[in-house]
Image (tube, rainbow, N blue to C red):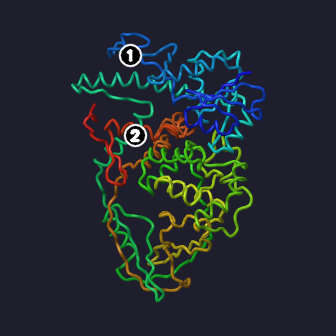
Amino acid sequence: MHIVILAEKPNQAKDISQIFKNVKRNNGYYEITDNDFFPNASVTLTYGIGHLVGLALPTAYDEKYKQWRKQDLPIFPQNFKFEVTKGTKDQFQTVKKLLKQADTLIIATDSDREGENIAYSIFNQAGVNFSKVTIKRAWFNSQTKEELTRAFKNLRPASETYNFYLEAQAREKADWLTGMNLSRLATLLFGEHHIQETFSMGRVQTPTLYMIFKRNFDIEHFKPQDYYQLKSNVHSDKGDVLATYEKNFTERKNLDDFLQQHQLQTENQATLKSIDKELKSEYSPKLFNLSDLQKFANKRFKLTAQQTLTTVQSLYEKHKLLSYPRSDCHFVTENEFTYLTAHLNDYLNILSKRIENPLKTPNKRYVDNKKVQAHYAIVPTDKIPSEEALQQLTSAERHIYLEVLKRTVAMYEEPYQYEQTIFTFDIQQVDFKAKGKVVKNLGYRRILQDTKADTKKEDTLPDLKENSVYASTLLTETKQTKPLPRYTEGTIIEAMENAGRTIEDKENKQILKETQGIGTEATRANIIETLKKKNILFLKKIFCIVHLKEQRFANY
């Protein structure tokens, strides 16, 4: 029996090769002998260089497509053609030759839709006879030796993951149809208006660009409007309390009429009508998926979406410290919870933190086998780095690793608990309210308290008695409405995830909700980078604020 293992890229193949006993390196592949994994079999491990095979250009169908003409659109192939990617032909020939010799194929590309697509695209282009080979899948969520060993000891039938390939193929073909047709059409139409440029259109790229354009347009045409707030500063010997009337006034006349109607003066008496107290609990945030991590890193460290993805990829692939990076999941299974629990003290030592009563049983907020499909959340692996190894990481790698560590460890802490108190003051039969918090248990914030989001000062209220009467000073504040802020890379990612929120059509709204918006965890950062490389977007200052470079096409 001859077995061929197909990895996605050279480094991945190298990691896989290290779990076997006898390995010989050749040009473009490894020869493996290991009876523990593959008794009495000849085994070859080879690899792609990312995409060895891709969709062919329109000229592969007809030479007439060299010239862009409206009458030739749409280009809609009945059968799509594929071709070997430029610069990878030598490696493809090596892989093709090996595949032709195989009785069993093991897919060991990245465990995601695109990894599946890469494998089957190579198989198809190489002319693999699927009726004569057995195909299996090595499915792994990290590239540690332990995880790869587990994956190859528990190979899955290829049928379990084949649908990922079908989905990726549908996306790839949809991207081709959109890009090849609309890019030509837009270029030709703008050319009729004497704008002689090549315009790039994309299935995800163009809606993303429109969202940014719409936000910029709304900001530049925004007209601020005044509105008025009514407040009262209640004076007590234990400290002043600023209470607010909960409705705003859009017209000054309405405010003046209200003051006159209730005979509210500058100086009034305020009766503490009621004190409402409620104990509230707040659990630690969800475990990171890629989009959440990109949003967090953009806000916290000013990293672009692509920089975050590159950093997480390095921590996964090179350092073996984090699990699979392109995850869209917020949960882990009980298996991951078991190994995370076993290493909890190691993680806490790295963070110089303690948890007095760590969670012993899985919490469904974070651990749910049914919620994990292809991949679980981004969490630390069971590889524990030394202090020296941590110092050798880049600044971005260290920041990202420690934040993932904190977010994961925080799920073992108790909830943050606080008592919310609401004072309701009666001033001339008008209710003014003041809210405050008293912390009862820091809980998970003991782990996350050094992040900006968790160090904000809590409002506190003095110890006042119900039905007591106090002097108060009426205040009116004039404010202005503000436009929504310009997008940052983090908020663009969020807008892409939630693109359906602004759609009125119910069917499309539901589709976008089910598909988690436009783009995927793997592609959103690349879409933003593409728009920047084409000089359509640029970043302003350290805040990663995204602007359209120019809006001169708005009228077309």
| Residue 273 percent across, percent down from the top left | 53, 79
Of badges 2 and 1, nearer the viewer stands 2
Whichever of labels 2 and 1 marks the residue nearer the N terminus, that label is 1
Residue annotated with mark 1: 73
Closest to the observer: 51 or 21?
Answer: 21
Q: Position of residue 547 (x, y in %)?
A: 32, 45
What label sits on residue 400 in the rendered view? none
Distance Cα–Cα, label 2 vs label 1? 28 Å
Asked where in the image residue 466 lies, by quadrant, the reply is bottom right
Q: Is residue 286 above or below residue 461?
A: above
Q: Which residue is mark 2?
A: 529
Q: Residue at x 44, y 30 (%)?
A: 203
Mark 2 in CB contact with mark 1 (< 8 angstroms)? no
Please, what secondary structure does the residue beneath circle 1 have? loop
Q: Nearer the viewer, residue 264 or 69?
A: 69
Please state which amino acid type lies under the numbered disc 2. Answer: Glu
- The amino acid type found where label 1 is placed reads Leu
Which quarter of the rendering shows the C terminus? Answer: top left
The quadrant of the image that shows the N terminus is top right
Mark 1 closeness class: few <14, some 14–19, many ≥20 residues within 10 Å: some
Relative to 389, does residue 276 appear above or below in the rendering? below
Q: Nearer the viewer, residue 460 or 412?
A: 412
- Name above or below for residue 295 compared with residue 128: below
The crowd level at tag 2 (other Cα within 10 Å; few <14, some 14-19, many 20+) is some
Could you tell me which residue is drawn at 49 percent across and 82 percent down? 271
